[in-house]
């Protein structure tokens, strides 16, 4: 049976009563199989699984989709019940931000200003501020985040390290539709035709990830994105540092399909050009 709490006092009481290790999954609701996978990973790690459902106004820009963001609380609760979640914390904005717009927020540093951060100014300060608050309120032993939001995951790891959070930050690989589309709450905005168009993102990443030098990776991915409204296609180190030439890397893409903005990424193994030539010959 999943308990639901909405206030800080209720959360504090339920948290104090939790036995054993606590695993948290933070969400904005509209739960899908990606979230369910995070909950199952949390279940494996923790004795007590806590899910948060909060559409955080602080991470939405003025022209973004805060008002139309899907809110499906009853269905979300059914997913939590099915996955054996012990406790759902579903605060209102007034509970999370009792003093209104916070004056002090978490600064994401240089990585917060590029890729998603360049297109969505202030987004990662909003994400890190609410994640920081939720980590403090829920005091988990481990917190689970999806690789689908790879830059977010990387920044949360950095924040946990730099701001002395004890929780282990666990990344979970992206869950996809059988056709390759990364699951996302925003997929429900897509028409059938738009869904078909959106498949170009994962196709581009797969094409890129099959190559092994930066130039070839980017060329192969770019070819699949022709005609799409692309915000960025970027190849970075696995920690999102700039310009990798060899080793583990990450290929990231963001594009608009109709009025919907989608992101995706995949790991890429870069090898030096001599080794790449040999790989191509095999
Ligand atoms: N396809 C997925 N696979 C694995 N994790 C996911 C997937 N989609 C979302 N998550 C993770 O679930 C957590 C909550 O994400 P959120 O509630 O924003 O869902 P979302 O589907 O990413 O929504 P949005 O469409 O707003 O990006 C985040 O850690 C996110 O990375
Ligand atoms: C981590 C998060 C729950 C913070 O609002 C959100 O950015 C999300 O759902 O990925
Ligand atoms: N999943 C990331 C949350 C956002 O797009 O605001």
Image (tube, grey):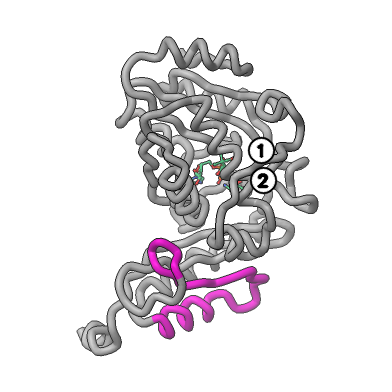
Q: Measured from the top left, where is residue 6 in percent x and y?
A: 62, 18
Q: Which mark is residue 211?
A: none
Q: Nearer the viewer, residue 84 or 92?
A: 92
**Please, what secondary structure does the residue beneath circle 1 have?**
loop
Q: Which residues are magenta?
A: 214-241
- Horizontal arrangement in the rendering, residue 63 relative to residue 200 (left or right): right
Q: Measured from the top left, where is residue 73 in percent x and y?
A: 63, 26
Q: Is residue 36 magenta?
A: no
> Which residue is pictured at 47% across the width and 61% down the height?
265
Q: Residue under circle 1?
A: 56
**Please, what secondary structure does the residue beneath circle 2 have?**
helix
Q: Measured from the top left, where is residue 155 in percent x and y?
A: 49, 52
Query: Measured along the vertical axis of the image, is residue 94 above or below residue 185?
Result: above
> Which residue is pictured at 48% across the width and 83% down the height?
219
Q: Measured from the top left, where is residue 83 in percent x and y?
A: 42, 26
| Residue at mark 1 to residue at mark 2: CA–CA distance | 6 Å
Q: Quadrant of the C terminus?
A: bottom left
Quarter of the image where one finds residue 57: top right
- Horizontal arrangement in the rendering, residue 159 relative to residue 212 (left or right): right
Mark 1: C-beta under 8 Å from nearest atom of ligand 2: yes
Badge 1 crowding class, 10 Å Cα cut-off, few under 14, some 14 to 19, many 20 or more, is: many
Q: Are marks 1 and 2 in contact (CB under 8 Å)?
A: yes
Q: Residue under circle 2?
A: 59
> Which residue is pictured at 52% across the width and 38% down the height?
32
The total of numbered circles placed on residues is 2
Mark 2: C-beta under 8 Å from nearest atom of ligand 3: yes
Query: Measured along the vertical axis of the image, is residue 144 above or below residue 19?
Result: below
> Which residue is pictured at 44% across the width and 13% down the height?
16
């Amino acid at each position: 049976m999943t308990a639901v709490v909405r206030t800080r006092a209720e959360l504090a009481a339920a948290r104090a009563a939790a036995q054993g290790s606590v695993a948290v999954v933070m969400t904005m609701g509209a739960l899908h199989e990606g979230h369910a996978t995070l909950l199952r990973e949390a279940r494996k790690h923790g004795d007590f699984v806590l899910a948060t459902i909060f559409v955080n106004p602080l991470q939405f820009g003025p022209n973004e989709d805060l008002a139309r963001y899907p809110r499906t609380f009853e269905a979300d609760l059914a997913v939590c019940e099915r996955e054996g979640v012990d406790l759902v914390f579903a605060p209102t904005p007034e509970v999370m931000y009792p003093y209104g717009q916070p004056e002090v927020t978490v600064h994401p540093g240089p990585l917060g200003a590029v890729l998603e951060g360049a297109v969505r100014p202030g987004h990662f300060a909003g994400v890190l501020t609410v994640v920081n608050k939720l980590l403090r309120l829920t005091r988990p032993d481990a917190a689970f985040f999806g690789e689908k939001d790879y830059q977010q995951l990387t920044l949360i790891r950095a924040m946990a390290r730099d701001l002395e959070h004890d929780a282990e930050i666990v990344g979970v690989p992206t869950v996809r539709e059988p056709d390759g589309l990364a699951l996302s709450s925003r997929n429900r905005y897509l028409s059938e035709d738009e869904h078909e168009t959106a498949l170009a993102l994962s196709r581009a990443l797969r094409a890129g990830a099959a190559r092994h030098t930066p130039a070839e990776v980017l060329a192969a991915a770019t070819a699949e994105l022709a005609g799409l409204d692309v915000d960025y296609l970027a190849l970075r180190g696995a920690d999102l540092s700039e310009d990798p030439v060899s080793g583990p890397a990450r290929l990231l893409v963001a594009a608009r399909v109709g009025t919907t903005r989608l992101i995706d990424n995949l790991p890429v193994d870069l090898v030096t050009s001599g080794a790449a030539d040999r790989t191509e010959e095999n």
